[in-house]
Amino acid sequence: MASLLASPQIKKNPDLYVFLPLLYTVWSDTVLTPSEVATLEGLIRSQTWLSDEDRSLLLSQIDPTAPPPPDDFMQWREEIRRVASDPRPKQSLVDLGIALAALHDDGTISPRLLGAKTSLEKIEATLGLISHEAVSSFHDRRSTITAQQSTTHSFEPVKLTAILDGNQADLIRKVKTLLCDPEFSYVDPGDLGRYRAQVLRWLKHLADQGYGAWAYPVNYGGQADMAGYFTIMETLSYHDLSMVVKFGVQFGLWGMSVYFLGTEKHHQKYLKDIGSLELPGCFAMTETHHGSNVRGIETTATYNHHNKTFTIHTPHIHARKEYIGNAALHGQKATVFAKLILDGKDYGVSAFVVPLRDKSGKLHPGVTIEDCGRKMGLNGVDNGLIHFNQVVIPKDDMLDRYSSVNDEGRFESPITSDNRRFFTMLGTLVGGRIGIPRSGLSAAKTGLTIAIRYGDQRKQFGPEGGAEVPILNYRTHQRRLMPLLANAYALHFGLQYLTDRFLKRSEEEMQEIEALAAGLKAWATWNTTATLQECREACGGKGYLSENRIDALKNDTDIYTTFEGDNTVLLQLVAKSRLTEFKQEFSNMNMFTIVNYLAGQAKTSITEMNPIAVRNTDEEHLLDPEFQLSAFRYRERDILTSAAKRLKRHIDSGMDSFDAFNVCQHHLVMVSQAYVERILLEEFRAQIERVSDAGCRAVLKKLCDLFALSQIDKNKGWYLEQGYMEGVKTKAIRKLVNQLCWDIRQDAVPLVDAFDIPDKLLSAPIAVR
Amino acid sequence: MASLLASPQIKKNPDLYVFLPLLYTVWSDTVLTPSEVATLEGLIRSQTWLSDEDRSLLLSQIDPTAPPPPDDFMQWREEIRRVASDPRPKQSLVDLGIALAALHDDGTISPRLLGAKTSLEKIEATLGLISHEAVSSFHDRRSTITAQQSTTHSFEPVKLTAILDGNQADLIRKVKTLLCDPEFSYVDPGDLGRYRAQVLRWLKHLADQGYGAWAYPVNYGGQADMAGYFTIMETLSYHDLSMVVKFGVQFGLWGMSVYFLGTEKHHQKYLKDIGSLELPGCFAMTETHHGSNVRGIETTATYNHHNKTFTIHTPHIHARKEYIGNAALHGQKATVFAKLILDGKDYGVSAFVVPLRDKSGKLHPGVTIEDCGRKMGLNGVDNGLIHFNQVVIPKDDMLDRYSSVNDEGRFESPITSDNRRFFTMLGTLVGGRIGIPRSGLSAAKTGLTIAIRYGDQRKQFGPEGGAEVPILNYRTHQRRLMPLLANAYALHFGLQYLTDRFLKRSEEEMQEIEALAAGLKAWATWNTTATLQECREACGGKGYLSENRIDALKNDTDIYTTFEGDNTVLLQLVAKSRLTEFKQEFSNMNMFTIVNYLAGQAKTSITEMNPIAVRNTDEEHLLDPEFQLSAFRYRERDILTSAAKRLKRHIDSGMDSFDAFNVCQHHLVMVSQAYVERILLEEFRAQIERVSDAGCRAVLKKLCDLFALSQIDKNKGWYLEQGYMEGVKTKAIRKLVNQLCWDIRQDAVPLVDAFDIPDKLLSAPIAVR
């Protein structure tokens, strides 16, 4: 093809420059389509002011078989840029072309160009978006709203930290200081032996500082401070999670089982040595064939009255204690759960202290231990399989708070039913279901800190001709991370509420607190998994490198959704507990009682289901805590009611209750989720009411709005099905969620800074400055 | 309290036994509530046929402060079981009590008990569900529908395998046979050095069998069989994924870049040695600061005409090539992407073959390499960071298919625009976006095989008094795994379709195929992540042990959502490609053209939006492929149309196009997802049409129904918002999804058996028999 800019025609007739931006644009597109060629050809032919030479020159420029050489093309771009440095809104390619022609014609715009403008612009319109993008791309310093968004400081992070830490601030600071000691530098998890030895050393340091015994009574070396114990677990969780889990196994599961299931004699004998790590031990409950259904364990403890001993025995290979932390290497004793057999009768599950190995590591006779080997995570914990072959222990080593054998060799218990006894024993260990979600939340906070700081710095793509943009300015990136940041804050307050309820519990509240703990444990640990997955992806390849820690956080916490109770199983227990509220209504249920029930508890929401409310899209309404809470409460109650109705219908029709519960299992999971989410929203709102600092209050309010509305958005299918909202309203909510994500992005870095995780512990090169 | 069964009264008046089941039940409950006590007390006081002694004996049995001793309680249970061994439907506790009383009264039922039955049963009713459950629990061999469900064989797995494997069956069998050789035994990933060395040995075995060069021309040692290359990648992915990724780096990225971006001289010089692994190499594109936005890379290749060389240079630390597979240890050369600088002008990205180290491992002068260290997964691949300090290479080592420097030192290219040239170069490498999702699908199939076989065998919980139940019989477990099994089949056929399109591509189809590959890559790899997460959780603690392989599968594939293009970024590219369909309409868009567009392409769906269709809950309708396809197509079109409208509205209002795209980013992701899902459904349906075996056809039809309806259920919020369906219909779909999960569960084991993954490769102890 003839070179356009070097042609004699264009020198003679500078008005030809008017075509240059259009020509440049069609060639810079990925493909010059036949329809584009036809359109341009039509345009050129229709311009009566062109000479035949002009026309054939221009037509030669759009021949797909003879593209302009790259060097010519680069020259075109240089030419166009001469007139494009001063961006004006709504500028078109034709505007650029006219300016360019004028430039080459001593600054005068020829009237015939102005005359042709309309027909030229019609052509441009058919190029659509591309032409708009093309005009912008010529601007050297193209400025966009997206590029301009950045971190602001609408509140003081230290003040927010103070709110989060509350009266535990001192202890948190002490634990963090200790963890920043060089002794606590991270180690590579590749070599199991070295990693496990290091984790044991860390545990010893913690015990030496008194943190292991913290919850125990003062006379056993502790501070009798259970709240502090949870704080320690949570704060340690900014560090290596193998250390946290081994800490929990030793001082929580092993120590607390002796403390809560044993009596004075056991406390005196063991508790001090457990707290100081002199006596490493295990919590041996789960068996290969009985994990979730732990009531079905098959290990036996047979009482021998002639010598007042128990014989602990594993009847077959599937009844071995499995996944037992501290068992493979360090545990010297274990709390073993076994069926008590007395005079040939099975008295259900009791707990016993059983020796595993001596201080030198030599296994006790009859005890065989196998290493669980490498795991997805937590490889600093030495999990093992334990097999007991007729291991004899003295009668005194039965943990006898809830069941015992008296001097006559008869079974005794303050609790009649073995079922109830079992759940009472488990209930004393509910602390584990508080420690785990709090640990998981710390891991999620670490992940968010890393991903959000990285997203604020990492730039990628940008407008043509403009600078690259921080990836946290992209809407999809915000949608991935901001709702999870809101969840982290919601869970922080929710888990504090759970802890408070637990610490101040009365006997009567135990069932409710157990349900709350089970529900929050499930919700929080799934949220941890989801959060760390998003954080990994949000950090791209950097997130995949172990040095940036999301690897370890993600893999170590992945089992949190399983241990201390499989989440799905837990949510079914929660749902059954919620259904007991309904016990009375349940049998006599008919539409009348259901309406009464709803009316009694939910006068507001009935009035909300009117044609105006279900279509109300006012921002003021959507941000009203009353609307949000009503929506959460309505959902909780409605799902509970309908689950109860379904169960009753099935059972009334002759279905076995076990089958009926199975048919409704998915529904029951929703019952529990709706319950947990309502609690989370209530407690988040309640916390905001207690905040006096205006800056903190405002940002927490925004986070709470995002939490509430993103949950409603997640469940919008349900709200629409019920007619609680119409499409216009759910669409308005989605829009508001996007807007809140955009707004909160500007506070996102200070919001993760307020978690106040030391850089030493974050350690990730992409997140520390 | 007085012992009930040992009391003289009960011997005198056996009718008192009628209360035993009620008493047992309230005590076996976890808590005896005050209202239960009051209710029972009222009942006892109202029974006029009781003597005062009888009454006070019974009242003493419900004193919360004096529970019956455990031994007595166990005796009660034994008593009740005597009459409960013969289960009758709708039996009540009172029925049991009456039978028990009769047993102790020589088999006669006293008339006064029959008279009291109504008032007794009223009490029982207030106990609600618990009483029903209690009656069932006395049955020794309680049989439930849930417990009875088990694996059936409605089709022959070998026939389904033949359908899946198609004409690649021979090659698949050969590769599997090789992988089952003891040489390919799995190794522990803990020690990076040993693991990487083993992976290299595996690669050598594969190269020796000719698998590395498979896609290359016959004269370079290959089979010129690209289809086979994908089959090999996919089949290898049942084994260690580090091996697969290193295979892909060496023979795919490194080899194919030389093949597709280079010319004859490069093929002759390198291809044979690449295919035989004589010449290990890298694909060095990504830089620290430019991953997704790879067009912005900053490495330079400056041409020196005086000696006809290029100088490859890394201008600053953030422009190092990062995450480069094969770089840390084994790569001797690399295809390096760099900006070509000629006479001080930047001609955009080109590719060059650059030496890294010699055969002995000594680094080439000017090359510095840093090991990326431990990663979340794929630790058998030696990823590295490469820094070039003025490395000089001969002019001939420019891969010059799309850009070159001629003898006069001038730039030449058949493609005018650098933008288009860059995307053309990338387009030749689209094979990677086919290989990765196919590899990820194999990993998902492995995970599903492990989790489904385990779920079929693993028993946990069961009805009181009945055997434990396989966990795959639980509805939540089915809901977790069955839709993912359906997805795996949908993706199998979808990725086969993509491969076929790619292999038979014409130049004009490339844009469409690139969009299809990008979209399917994103959808498939996210599905892999989601599938393996569910599989891990579904296998509980067993899923966490590395021996069961979900650990490695999950961690190795986690990066699949990032490499070969970050999924979120890819989906935006797909959406932009979809929008080009709209280019014409875009600028002139008004309601008229939109309606025309919709009407033209979608006559059926308009007619479907009538009041009857949106409420149609007939199973026949919901299972009708026409309904399902229409719903998918409507969604795809509507989201695309509304995204285009939104973009146009923003741009028309003066918003910069970059900002407009950002505001709509979330919407654009949905555009692409809806597009991919429509393709998947169409191809799944098309495949079923080709199946002649009735058994296979029936089960594939069910899987396809589950795929279609579970996707609609997932998106029900959208369908409800649009008014395309009403709540009654989405509820009916949810119910049908549950039913399909229940039905497919019975075929689930044969369905994963049909994947035909050798036990040797599965290796997981919980999955191999």
Image (cartoon, coloured by chain):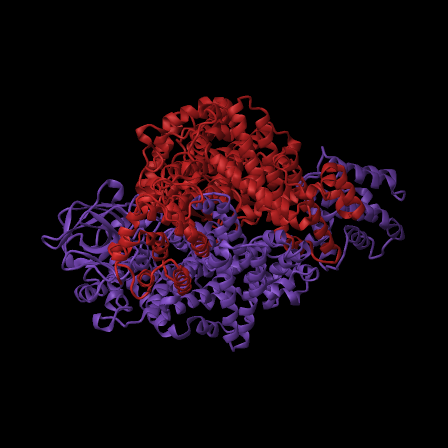
Chain colours: A red, B purple
Q: Nearer the viewer, residue A561 or A191?
A: A561
- Whether residue B29 is visible, yes or no, is no
Position of residue B534 measured from the top left corner of the image (x, y, whole percent): 49, 53
Quarter placement of the C terminus of chain B: bottom left
Q: Is residue B133 above or below residue A237?
A: below
Q: Nearer the viewer, residue B726 or A402?
A: B726
Tell me: B127 left or right of B369. right
Tell me: A532 left or right of A660. left
Toward the bottom, the furthest residue is B692
Q: Nearer the viewer, residue A336 or A173?
A: A173
Quarter placement of the N terminus of chain B: top right
Tell me: B687 left or right of A148. right
Toward the left, the furthest residue is B307
Position of residue B180 measured from the top left corner of the image (x, y, whole percent): 33, 66
Position of residue B130 measured from the top left corner of the image (x, y, whole percent): 71, 47
x 9%, y 53%: residue: B307
- Whether residue A132 is visible, yes or no, is yes
Q: Is residue A87 above or below residue A264?
A: below
x 82%, y 56%: residue: B106
Tell me: A210 left or right of A396. left
Which of the 4 image quarters holds residue B435?
bottom left
Q: Nearer the viewer, residue B234 or B335?
A: B335
